[in-house]
Image (cartoon, grey):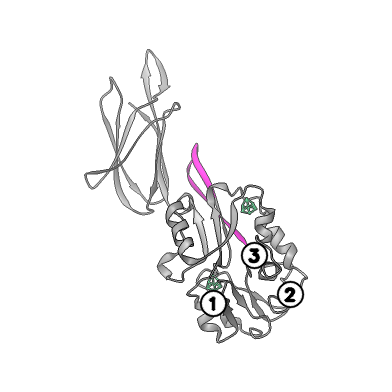
Amino acid sequence: MNKWNMIIDVAECTNCNLCTLATMDEYIGNDFPGYSAPMPKHGHKWIEILQKERGQLPLIDIAYVPTMCNHCDNAPCVAKGGGAIKKRDDGIVLIDPVKAKGRKDLVDACPYGHIWWNEELQLPQAWTFDAHLIDQGWKQTRGQQSCPTGAMRAVCVDDAEMTKLARDQGLEVVKPELATKPRVYYKNLWRYSKCFIAGSVSMEANGAVDCVEGASMRLFKGGAMVAQTATDNYGDFKFDRLDENSGEYVVEISAPGRAKKTIATKLGVSINLGEIRL
Ligand code: SF4
Ligand code: SF4
């Protein structure tokens, strides 16, 4: 049976927040019996854009990650709900706006923080995958419809096809270690979850300092080479997709006519080693 999944490309999200606004437009003040009660005007972020700045000037980048209820297959909220939260056959998880009344305890059941408490209605709420629209034949969500970059895409395929898509496109889920089996997948999540070692290589010749293009850069960890690259025409280099707090590294720089140089560094978060003069 085909089930709904969301694929989000972190590299395409510009933080315009149109998906967030479209979702607020859909739900604030609107009651969809059997699906959701109205979202409050303030305080809830059923779609929330996370952001992370990596590195230090001038070598920095920023990644934006739209997050929402993951419609997990192995959802702790469903387990705790005792019938107040249901998993539909098409993969969508719905908090019952009647049965869940007064169940503030369900807010803490989501390990991702995607259940919001509606104080006025005394109701836990989360993004419904726009199930009321899906059931009317919609093939996309309001957030996807409003996204100008195509960063967000709902797909309805069987689980085997989704597993293949995830493998072929290198998709990841958030916090896989929780084993909740999210149905929201991310492309290029490493731009948010991983870090880099970067820098800029220069040399002095004939009294002038110039950047070094094409310097050979090698990265070592524990004596073994783990990555290699070359400087660009600004002399910049970047070793990316490294784990946070992954410890000590050595950067080796080689350029024709210059002595080889090595720099030891310890990686906590992304680091710009600055200008390295050969
Ligand atoms: S993300 Fe949270 S609220 Fe959504 S299904 Fe998973 S556990 Fe439940
Ligand atoms: S509408 Fe698209 S680009 Fe804008 S914040 Fe949402 S996912 Fe990102």
Q: Is residue 86 above or below residue 189?
A: below
Q: In the image, is 170 to the left or to the right of 253?
A: right
Q: CA distance from mark 3 to mark 2?
A: 18 Å
Q: Which residue is mark 1?
A: 108
Dividing the picture into quadrants, the one containing residue 205 is top left
Q: Is residue 59 magenta?
A: yes
Look at 69% across and 71% down and name the residue there.
132
Look at 66% across and 58% down and name the residue there.
143
Q: Is residue 174 visible?
A: no
- Residue 31 location, x and y as percent? 76, 74
What amino acid type is highlighted by mark number 2? Phe
**Secondary element at image label 2:** loop
- Residue 239 location, x and y as percent? 38, 41
Tell which residue pokes out farthest to the top in this image: 206
Q: Give, as a single range, the part of the protein colored magenta.
A: 44-63
Q: Which residue is mark 3?
A: 45
- Residue 219 location, x and y as percent? 30, 40
**Quarter of the rendered image showing ligand 1:** bottom right
Q: Which residue is mark 2?
A: 32
